[in-house]
Amino acid sequence: MSEEQTIVNVYGANWCSDCRRTKKYLGEQRIHYGWFDIEKPDVEGEKALQFVYDTNEAIFGTKKRKIPAVEVIKDGERKLFVEPSNFELADFLGLAKRAKKSFYHTVIIGAGPAGLTAAIYLARDGYDVLVIEQSTVGGQAFITNRLDNFPGFPEGITGANFAENVKKQAERFGVEILSPQKVLNVGTCHPNASFDECQYKVVKTESQEFTCSAVLVATGSNYRQLVVPGSDALLGVSIHYCATCDGFFYKNRKIFVIGGGNSAFEESLFLKGKFADHVTILVRGNEPRASPVLQEKVRDRSGIEVWANSKVVELLGEDSLEAVRVKHTETGEVKDYHPDGIFVFVGLSPNTKFLKGVNLDSQGFITTSQQQSSVQGIFAAGDCRFGSVKQAVAAAGEGAAAAIAIREYLSNS
């Protein structure tokens, strides 16, 4: 592949974490790309925004505003992407990633704070460690606008800088990171054998298989989607799951935030502070689950209000949001409201669908005892584990605890 044969253009905004991730990945692969800022107050910015609308319409059938929109022309073939994963770009660009070995003491699936912390601990003790990441090294921490409560950073640190620091630290101890690669399954070293019958595990990706003594699953979680009548048509148009990514489209507008936990309250503060004129938080229960500190911050911030006992039952509109139908469960009243957009933070779904033979709870989280799953030699840490508290610092602590448990397992196996 040569630069003359390949043209890559990225359309987005400087505040968009997915845009930064895409540009970072292309830069790491030494691929020249054009950057077109949809926020530029000139004709070029207008053309860039129009390209985003047109690309979304070409892919989704409606003029959504998802970014980044990426155009790739390779060997005469033109391909359009919206919010592409690193793997999607790598696959089309022919950037094959292969690990150096076929056997590792430990394979870690997921390169967030839990996975990378465990990798640092194990590699520092002399074990061969491979970390496989499907998307972005750093996990959810990478797309977090800012970490203000992680110890050691008195002024706070951006999620991107935090992720880069932890990655460099892992690589300093010899950790091998394979990204982007998707793990298809974790199986036994002999066909048709059970985990109890096999000492080794086999981790299979799209391009390779790895044999290892231990596996750590640290795949994290994704936000659950709002599923009500009308939601499918408006996904990416008026329904959003990332305040940092899509908040720009709601400058000086009114929005609903759905959810009563820490994420909903944190993102509401961010949206009101950066973009929205007014934010209404809809909580299904009698009271929010967010921490008292966050609830107090929301109470003290003008332009944010909280509605308890309020459940979205339907969204009206096809090409744009016309109304949000809300049932106020305390009174039984159903009313239509007219915000400009909706941001949804209603909990997390673990990334564990690829696991077979490992006990999961009813929602798909991995059940553990001292970080070990129901299968000897398969461990879990971070947001994919049942009982985790969904915080970066806690995930890092779980990664350290898992590494210690794995070290003991390896010494006795």
Image (cartoon, rainbow, N blue to C red):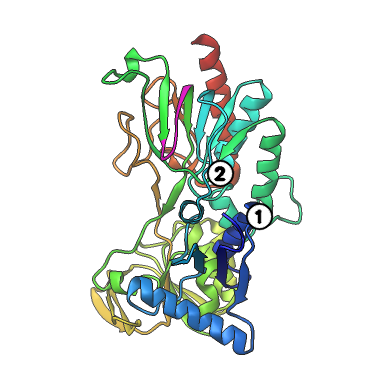
**Rendered image quadrant of residue 124:** top right
Residue 344 colored in magenta in the image: no
| Rendered image: mark on residue 112 | 2
Eyeballing the image, is 26 above or below 207? below
Q: Is residue 144 left or right of residue 317?
A: right
Residue 277 pos. (x, y %):
54, 83
Name, please, the residue furthest toward the top.
412
Q: Earlier in the sequence, mark 2 or mark 1?
A: 1
**Rendered image quadrant of residue 332:** bottom left
Residue 212 pos. (x, y %):
48, 22
Identify the secondary structure beneath mark 2. Answer: loop
Our reading of the magenta stretch's main secondary structure is: strand
Q: Is residue 205 left or right of residue 395?
A: left
Residues at discs 2 and 1 in contact (Cβ within 8 Å): no
Residue 119 pos. (x, y %):
60, 32
Residue 208 colored in magenta in the image: yes
Say which residue label 1 marks.
30
Q: Along the line of sight, which residue is nearer the eye, 135 or 326? A: 135
Q: Name the amino acid, label 1.
A: Arg
Range shown magenta: 205-212
Residue positioned 51% across, 44% down in the render: 96
Residue positioned 57% across, 26% down in the render: 403
Name, please, the residue furthest toward the right.
154
